[in-house]
Image (cartoon, rainbow, N blue to C red):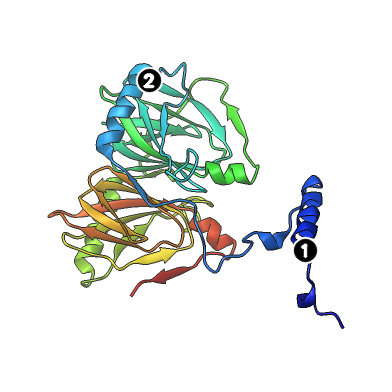
Amino acid sequence: MLELSDIQSSQEELEDYYTQLRTQHVAPAWLSEAVSVAPQSAAVPYLWHWRDLRPQAMRAAKLVGTAQAERRVLRLSNPKLSGIASQTLVANIQIVMPGEIARAHRHSAAALRLIIEGKGGYTVVNGERVPMFPGDLVLTPNWSWHDHANDTDAPMIWLDGLDTPLVRMLEAGFFEEYANETQQFGAPVNASQWHYPMSEMRAALERLADAANAGDAVVFEYKNRATGGPVMPTIACHMQLLRPGETTRGWRRVCRMNYHVVEGAGHSIIGGQRLDWEDKDVFTVPTWSYCAHVNSGDRPAFLFSFSDAPVMRALSLYREEIGS
């Protein structure tokens, strides 16, 4: 009986066979790396400094008007990816100048806004006016009408996080313009399901830190007020407080994570690479990469993060592991 391992083919025969397959748009799976022992990411750890980002955002405000760009956005691009911070999530910097309006629309992608700078502009979500102050988290879930406005005398700048790459990969993207430039709205609702004020999160984290034992992580997940689950089906958000001098243990997770330094100074070790951060910087952590944080300053550090963990959990693909 002929064993498969006994088959001997000449290189010429194999090349002829592979050529025929290519003409029929078929590929032999045994010539590609179909399965990996552990997750392999094309993305790399990377950090964007606020001292570089802010001047570019301000320059964009001078060079490009809202008539030319409905959303004046700078997309943070991972050096190993094309125009995105990670494979499933984008991290953008958006600026709205005094008196400007970013007109209303809706789309399949879910979005979050973590406010970096400003004195209190607002977003309107499905007819509800949501105030925006530094450190606040504002949500625009998928297919919700939303527009932004700056009625203050200073620039409004925030971090955008969207699941656009995931939606695009799934070929599920829709987009629709609102009939008018803005939505009608009532008075601001501070307890809105779209709004998580930094003042409340800061107070909760400080209470947790006071009660925690040395070495305990001081971190909260933002929860959907209606379901108790992640804030949106495809995106989870967390805020972590690092006490002065604190070093966390290294964790790795099967999900992509993007961080924003609300305030503080320190560094993170990601996949063996050190990234030094300070106030308002942004950095990305590829999937299944060990990540540990160090607060090297003399004041608390607050790290906001958003990830695609809900997607990985829903698909039973999520896994996490703590380092030694």
Residue type, label 1: Ser
**Rendering quarter of residue 272:** bottom left
Q: Which is more N-terminal, label 1 or label 2?
A: 1
- Residue 312 appears in view: yes
- Residue placed under numbered mark 1 in the picture: 10
Q: Please identify, in this view, whether the residue under mark 2 or under mark 1 is nearer the observer.
A: 1
Residue type, label 2: Glu
From this view, report whether residue 104 is shown above or below residue 226.
Answer: above
Task: Please report contact status of discs 2 and 1: CB closer than 8 Å, yes or no.
Answer: no
Q: Residue at x 53, y 29 (%)?
A: 105
Image quadrant containing the C terminus:
bottom left
Disc 2 crowd rating (10 Å Cα; few below 14, some 14-19, many 20+) is some
Q: Residue at x 59, y 44 (%)?
A: 167
- Residue placed under numbered mark 2 in the picture: 100
Query: Whole-percent x and y of residue 146?
Result: 49, 32
Depth check, front residue: 267 or 115: 267
Image quadrant containing the N terminus:
bottom right
Secondary structure at badge 2 equals: loop
